[in-house]
Amino acid sequence: MSLKLYFAPGACSFVPHSLLETAGADFEPVMVKLHKNEQNDAPFRAINPRGQVPVLVDGDQVITQITAIVTYLDGKFPQQQFLPRDLLARTRVLETLAWMNNTVHPTFTYVFMPFKFAGTPAAQEELKSFNAKHYAGLLGELETMAKNAADGGKAWLGGEKLGPLDVYALVLLRWGGFANIDPTSFPALWAHVNKVAQQPGVAKAIVRERLQLNLYKG
């Protein structure tokens, strides 16, 4: 078995985890427990000095970062068409994927781990409160994408088949619960995410990671 995926339950590593399961790939899933700080243990740092998941290992090659891993998996499993074949459509998917990863995802980090960015409790609370509202607005953009896809008769956000945008949308909406955001307040996105969760490969990853879709407590 040459493929190995280092993942953390509920993290953005859920995206390649789901894609590997969808492809029926023979891979070894290796859990990294972030709450136990395993990402900073020497064995993992030897694999990824940045101490981040996901990490995809294929033989002697180590690949990090969501966009790079998704592009690699698309090339390794071309029959899955995780990315569109048309050049412009492919570019648009990568454009949106990059936005999810470099804008939406970091905004949530300010909510979930404000201690990384401010030293006092008051400053941390302000960061958390401000960015929770900003995060809701970004989820609103995803809501529009999901609604436009549904209204246009498109089953998936980025192409003719399930792809990284669909799975990342699931991750991002799920995280909203930690920011006290009700996922059902985004009806088109919530419906889409539930459809994504029912796909066999995604469902396998959900079971392995023991995830609950709706984390909103009210």
Image: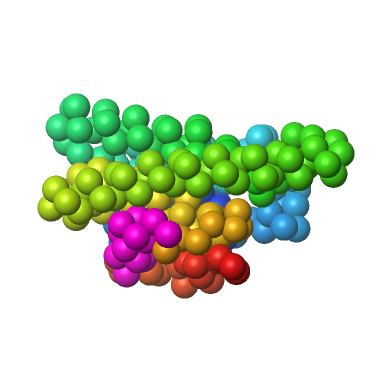
The x and y percentages for residue 205 are 44, 65
Q: Residue at point 24% right, 33% down?
A: 90
Q: Position of residue 179 (x, y in %)?
A: 60, 54
Q: Is residue 72 left or right of residue 79?
A: right
| Number of numbered callouts drawn | 0
Write down the region rendered in magenta: 185-198
Say whether residue 139 is visible: yes
Magenta span main SS: helix
Residue 179 lies, with reference to residue 108, above or below; the image says: below
Q: Quadrant of the C terminus?
A: bottom right
Residue 216 image-quadrant placement: bottom right
**106 up-or-down from 29: above or below:** above
Q: Residue at x 70, y 39 (%)?
A: 127
129 in magenta: no
Q: Nearer the viewer, residue 100 or 201?
A: 100
Q: Is residue 190 magenta?
A: yes
Query: Which quadrant would the N terminus be assigned to in this image?
Result: bottom left
In the image: residue 87, left or right of residue 214:
left
